[in-house]
Image (spheres, helix red, strand yellow):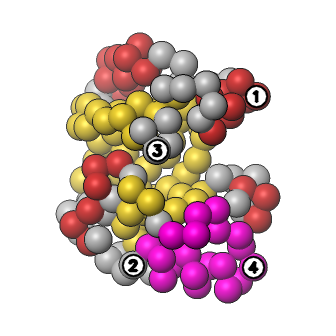
Amino acid sequence: MLSRIDHIGIACHDLDATVEFYKKTYGFTDVHFEVNEEQGVRECMLKINATGDGAASYIQLITPTRPDSTVAKWLEKNGEGVHHIAFGTDGSDVQEEADGIAAKGVRVLYDAPRRGSMGSRITFLHPKDCHGVLTELVQKASEA
């Protein structure tokens, strides 16, 4: 079962400047930087708060590392802003969650989950089936 908003993904042109804006303006802390070569992005996860179940809510700032990445194409078309919303599982397998949602007529973009931030397992749902919102499903690393 999906149990929380794991993060909101925000695409940006200048990751370092955007991280500084969120830290200075809202007081968020930079928890984790990484490059995801498979997705062609450099990212920073900024922690917003912790929850009672040991999870946390994050803002994920993402910038492309190559011009052919989906984020680069998205930025070119839409400019900076909210790119996706991610829902976390309650410990269940992200593939099982995706299969259950697919059975309801929603297209899943990956045949199998991929590696996401901080060792998580992820998949995406097609925005045209989710009222225009690119939706990510996340199984955090300690649940994977």
| Amino acid at pointer 1 | Lys
93 in the magenta segment: no
The numbered mark, 2 or 1, whose residue comes first in the sequence reads 1
**Residue at the spot of label 1:** 77
Taking the spot 43% from the left edge, 50% from the top edge, the residue there is 7
| Amino acid at pointer 3 | Glu
Taking the spot 72% from the left edge, 56% from the top edge, the residue there is 127
Quote the CA–CA distance across marks 1 and 4. Answer: 27 Å
Residue 137 shows in this picture: no
**Residue at the spot of label 3:** 38
Indicate which label's residue lies in the foreground, 2 or 3.
3
**Residue at the spot of label 4:** 105
Are the residues at dot 2 and dot 3 in contact (C-beta closer than 8 Å)?
A: no
Say which quadrant the N terminus sits in: bottom left
The numbered mark, 4 or 3, whose residue comes first in the sequence reads 3
* Secondary-structure class at tag 3: loop
Q: Is residue 11 left or right of residue 25?
A: right
Quote the CA–CA distance across marks 4 and 3. Answer: 27 Å
* Secondary-structure class at tag 1: helix
Label 1 Cα neighbours within 10 Å, binned few <14 / some 14-19 / many ≥20: few
The numbered mark, 2 or 3, whose residue comes first in the sequence reads 3
Are the residues at dot 1 and dot 3 in contact (C-beta closer than 8 Å)?
A: no
Taking the spot 71% from the left edge, 73% from the top edge, the residue there is 106
**Residue at the spot of label 2:** 93
Task: Give, as a single range, the part of the protein colored magenta.
Answer: 94-112
Give the vertical position of 4 relative to 59 (above or below). Answer: below
